[in-house]
Amino acid sequence: MTNSGTDAAERDRGTVSLYVVLFTPVVFLLAGLLVDGGLAIHARQRAADMAEQAARAGANEIDLAALRETGEPVVDPGRARAAACELLSAYGDEVTGARCDASTEAVTVTVQINVQPQFLAVFPGFGEFTMTSDATARPVTGAAP
C-alpha cells in the first residue's frame, strides 16, 4: 500500500510548478489590460475634455460687429483659432498633437495624447499609443430653443 501512495506522489511532483509557469504570463497580461485599459480610457476622456474646453473658448470669440448688424452670433475665425490653440498650449507637453479649425459658424478642435503603458510595455508589440478626441462648439446667444 505504501508503495502505490509513493507512486502517486511522485507522479504529481511539478504539477503546481507547471501551472505557475503557464498562468503567470496570463495573469500579468490580464492585469496589464486592466491597468493600461484604464489609462487609455482616462487619456481618451482627458483628450475629450481638453478638446471641448478649447472649442468652447474659441466659440466665445464672436464677431461683435456682425452680431450687432445681423443679430446672429458669428465666430471670428482668426481669433477663435488663436483662443482655442492658446488654451491647449496651457496643457504643455501633455498634449502631443492638436488641430484648431474655425469657421464663422463653429470651432472644431482635435487633441492627441500619448499614453505609455505600465504593464503591457513588457510584452513585445505593446508600446506607447495615442488617444485622440475632437469637439465642435457653436456660438449661441439667449435661451436655447
Image (cartoon, rainbow, N blue to C red):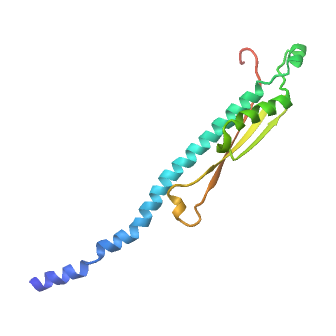
Q: Give residue 51's quadrant in the image.
A: top right
Residue 76 placement: quadrant: top right
Q: Is residue 106 left or right of residue 123?
A: right
Residue in view at x 9 percent, y 83 percent: 2
Which residue: 52% across, 59% down? 120
Q: Residue furthest left?
A: 1
Q: Is residue 55 visible?
A: yes
Q: Is residue 26 above or below residue 36?
A: below
Q: Is residue 105 above or below residue 21?
A: above
Quadrant housing the N terminus: bottom left
Q: Does residue 105 show up?
A: no
Residue farthest toward the bottom in the current orientation of the protein:
3
Left or right of residue 118, residue 58 in this image: right
Identify the residue at image location x=68%, y=31%: 53
Residue 38 point in image, percent of width and height: 52, 47
Work out whether residue 54 or residue 91 is closer to the camera in this orientation and state it: 91
Q: Quadrant of the C terminus?
A: top right
Picture mark count: 0
Q: Position of residue 81 (x, y in %)?
A: 81, 33
Left or right for 87, reference 44? right
Q: Quadrant of residue 55?
A: top right
Is 28 above or below relative to 66?
below
Residue 47 in picture, x, y percent from top left: 64, 41
